[in-house]
Amino acid sequence: MNKKVAEKAAEVLKALAHPTRLRIVELLQDGEMCVSELVDALGVKEPIASQQLNKMKDKNILGSCRRGCMVFYYLKDKQIIDELLDCMVEHCKNNHSK
């Protein structure tokens, strides 16, 4: 891995490195959701959800589209993010007791 790719990978991992952001990614694995749906599913206030969504959007993990007054978010590289999340979850499950 060259330096530029390593730096980009580190940025993506940093952008995912928060429990709420990981939960958002997990929710979006099933398809796009609007902010209010994410707020309800996460049990957090809208400003907190919006802040976390914007951090991931800024790092090109999420995309968004506006429909009327609602903003919907989705995973930009769904297959890659799905695989990454699955690997992380599996790693944590396997190493939980160690």
Image (cartoon, rainbow, N blue to C red):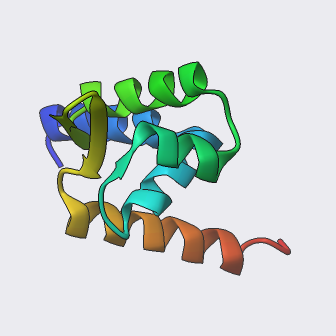
Q: Nearer the viewer, residue 24 or 13?
A: 24
Q: Residue at x 42, y 34 (%)?
A: 15
Q: Observer-nearest residue: 34 or 12?
A: 34
Q: Residue at x 31, y 60 (%)?
A: 81
Q: Is residue 70 above or below residue 22?
A: above
Q: Is 64 drawn above or below residue 92 in the view shown?
A: above
Q: Residue at x 66, y 68 (%)?
A: 92
- In the image, is 15 to the left or to the right of 62? right
Foreground residue among 5 and 46: 46
Residue most toward the right?
97
Q: Position of residue 52 (x, y in %)?
A: 48, 29
Name the residue at the front extreme: 68
Relative vertical location of residue 67 with respect to residue 98 in this rendering, above or below: above
Quarter of the image for residue 28 reads bottom left
Residue 22 on image: x %, y % = 53, 50
Q: Is residue 12 left or right of residue 18?
A: left
Q: Looking at this view, is 45 or 77 the one in front?
A: 45
Q: Position of residue 68 (x, y in %)?
A: 20, 32
Q: How many marks?
A: 0
What residue is drawn where x is 78% and y is 71%? 96
Locate residue 61: give its quadrant: top left
Q: Position of residue 79 (x, y in %)?
A: 22, 70
